[in-house]
Amino acid sequence: MSNGGSKRSSVNRRGFVKGAAALGAGAMGFPWHQLAWAQNVPTEYDGSKFQLKAPEPNPKSGGVLKYAITSRPPHFDMHQSGTINSLGSQGCMFDNLIRRDPRDSGKTIIPDLAHSWEISKDAKTYTFHLRKDVQFHDGADFTSDDVKATYDRIVKPPNGVSIPRSTLFSTVSEITTPDKNTVVFKLSEARPANFMMAAFASGWNTIVRKKTLEDNNYNLRRVVDIPGTGPFKSVRRVENEVWVMEKNKNYWNKTLPYLDGIEFYHALPFSPELGSALLSNRVDYGRIVDPVTARKAKETKGMSSTNFYQSVIQGTWVNNKKKPLDDPRVRRALHLVFDRPVLVDVVKDVAPMMVGGFIYPFSDFATPKDELAKRVGYQADSTAAIKEAKALLAAAGQSGGIKGLDFLVREVASFKLWAQAIQAMLQQALNVETKLRPVVESVWFDDVKTGNFDLAVGAVVSTLLDPSDYFNAWYKKDGPQNYGFWNNDAFNALLPKIDTEVDPAKRLAVIREAEKIMEQDPPVLPICWEKINDVWYNYVKGHNPYEYFGIYDCVRFDTFWLDK
């Protein structure tokens, strides 16, 4: 990865709007490291006349887009989900309060159901003004009550409901609705305005109807067709095959969508089947495509491909509730014998990956790549790492190794390859024996949530690039995606400092301190960080994936159109 690519990813993810004129034209963004509280974010914005259109002139209406993406959701409640299997196909059914602009790869924030906003001088009150004459797919009128009900559940999930993005809104103390077209969020303490606006704009935080929540006891896991206000609505779904959407003819943005419909075809990530469907033109667009197919697409007339980094950690979770895995020495020993350069190489023809630790390696917060490569556990020569690992295991009373560990594996090609390689590394270096248990996504997520595993290899998604998001979600005690049940008091004590420190240098120092703790007492055994490929035919217009960071924000398809 080049330094230029790393810098670009950080800036793109943190870009924000600057004034009405800029919004209408595709605004310039601000890099995160230049932002403190609200000083560089527009505290008042009137977007009542803003209207989103395709980036190209004279877009055509009509046609059905055939889109291939993994779409085997563990359930249908997107707020409770953490996988593209949910959002990838369901996202087009919904709108957000505010959103990221699909025309510039999501670099800027633009109006959505809220056309305008004000942020108070003390950065503790966010007021959003909502569009009128918006309807849900079931014909009900959209009001501020729906926004309040949606965010009340996100901020403080009821019993039996777990929402990974709740940590983004930990300082929201009150949500009020002065009238049906206004919603006000009050914070107990100020947070950087760019952080809060990014949280509101996350593709995950879609607005659902209050009555839908009430009718389903605030749990939508089993509701296949959830009424949204989005540009498309559900017509038909066949498990593991296709989800058919049709145009919402009553969509509030009268020029959108251009497509008559979308057919989402289920295809496993990086699979030969996905590549074959693309190269034979059975589908128009494919996401999470293997590198070989991506290269062929670039060489094929009329096709295009690009790749981009992901807000996803690939790792192996260790169940801290199980002995002897509850011992930090044991977990660090396992962490050290992961030969990460080899693990990246193992999947090079299946999935593009890069070596990294507990912090996004392509962000401004990460230990520089060259420095990380010198650290024990990340070195190309694993001799020192294995020596320390054996000593740690002996000190923990496990010099003879560990037998019979249940190794839960997500049913994806890359995870299955890694599981076999990791199994061999643990056996050869430490005499740690594992039994692989491949399962589909729904079982994997259920079993990690209930602790029905010893080791579990999979991917976990964050919403933002900022450690205040994923540190709280993945590593904090009782965090919604803390699948290893990890709890480190020293680490937990640092989180409030990371969340509230506005001086960049001081904040980075605290993040480094937290990283040192995780290296010695690993909450997860990081494998690598993900890059993915998109492939499409050039007649698919209205999209700009070239500078994406992540695939979880620009999922609406409202600006897509077919030039054929």
Image (cartoon, rainbow, N blue to C red):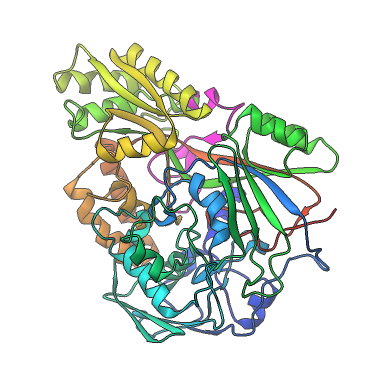
Q: The magenta stretch spans which residues?
A: 342-371
Number of numbered discs visible in the structure rendering: 0
- Position of residue 92 in the picture relative to residue 127 (left or right): right
x and y percentages locating residue 78 in the rendered image: 44, 54
Instruction: Tell me, yes or no, if residue 526 can be seen here.
Output: no
Q: Is residue 507 above or below residue 289?
A: below
Instruction: Tell me, yes or no, if residue 451 can be seen here.
Output: yes
Residue plotted at (59% across, 41% down): 532
- Position of residue 514 in the picture relative to residue 237 (left or right): left
Quarter residue 11 falls in: bottom right
x and y percentages locating residue 128 in the rendered image: 46, 81
Main secondary structure of the magenta stretch: loop
x and y percentages locating residue 196 in the rendered image: 41, 69
x and y percentages locating residue 261 in the rendered image: 69, 56
Confirm whether the magenta stretch covers residue 354.
Answer: yes
Q: Is residue 152 above or below residue 318?
A: below
Residue plotted at (49% across, 22% down): 417
